[in-house]
Image: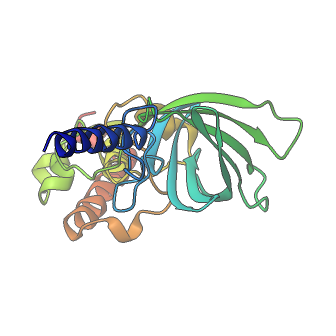
Amino acid sequence: MQLNMKSSLALLALLTLSLFSCKNKSGTATGEKTQTADSLAAGQPDFRLGSFTGPFGDNKITILVSVINGDTVKGRSVVGGNDRPFSGMITKEESRWHFHAAEPGDHPDDGVFDLYLDPGLPGLLTGNWKANDKTRPAKTFSLVRKEFRYDTTVGEYPQASARLLVPEDVENMMKEDLNYMRNEIYARHGYCFSRRSMRDLFETESWYIPNSADIRNALTDTEKKNIALIKRYEKYAEEYGDEYGR
């Protein structure tokens, strides 16, 4: 009976030792998956994807990382009236991800991006862009994660997107204000303006995110009718300004 008790204790000690030996240095049993800030487990959102926006020289840029497949990456850059695709490679460099991606090269403003994303700061995309035209200076930037959302409540004249305008809404407005109201409709849709004067007006607005160089199909019927009305009064303001008391 005494011998059996000793054997049982020895067996228990052996099992306990075996259990601890199966632990790795972090204290996790071998074979278990750990969840870290850098985890890309199946079924979990990939933090490397998304939309990032911020200053880019004298302009505001949006970089959209849309597809990551293994070590390849695809996306778009929207800046200065241009909406350009890019593609390239993604690699892990120490604690951060490095995207090396090029625009097609068939446009004079195309170039190559080197983008960096740290899993500890998933809301900040840093990097640089070098133009294919070697006479142009490189640009460095820090962009914040921000998704474009169409919002009819933002801007100085939100009513131009929210409801049908009537002549009384616009007939006493100055031409410059009418022009701003009309272009603000496009800005709410994330239109990336090619005209420098328009970019200067909207790129300082916190709600404005350049998202596309063509938003014609995104305009609502209400907005299309309002644009036509505003344009008509812009023309009147230009031709008959004195008669309208301006």
Furthest-right residue in this view:
134
Q: For residue 7, which quarter of the picture?
A: top left
Tell how many labels: 0
Q: Quadrant of the C terminus?
A: top left
Tell me if residue 234 comes above or below residue 242 in the rendering. below
Left or right of 115, for residue 137: right
Name the spot of residue 106 as percent of width and height, x first.
78, 62
Nearest to the observer: residue 246 or residue 183: 183
Residue drawn at (80%, 30%) of the image: 137
Render colour scheme: rainbow
Residue drawn at (24%, 67%) of the image: 220
Name the spot of residue 193 as percent of width and height, x first.
51, 48
Residue drawn at (67%, 59%) of the image: 87
Q: Is residue 16 visible?
A: yes
Tell me if residue 148 comes above or below residue 72 in the rendering. above
Left or right of 84, for residue 36: left
Q: Quadrant of the N terminus?
A: top left
Name the spot of residue 20 as percent of width and height, x first.
36, 37
Q: Is residue 210 visible?
A: no
Residue drawn at (70%, 30%) of the image: 139
Tell me if residue 239 comes above or below residue 213 in the rendering. above
Nearest to the observer: residue 243 or residue 74: 74
Name the spot of residue 71 as percent of width and height, x first.
64, 58
Left or right of 77, for residue 37: left
Nearest to the observer: residue 74 or residue 211: 74
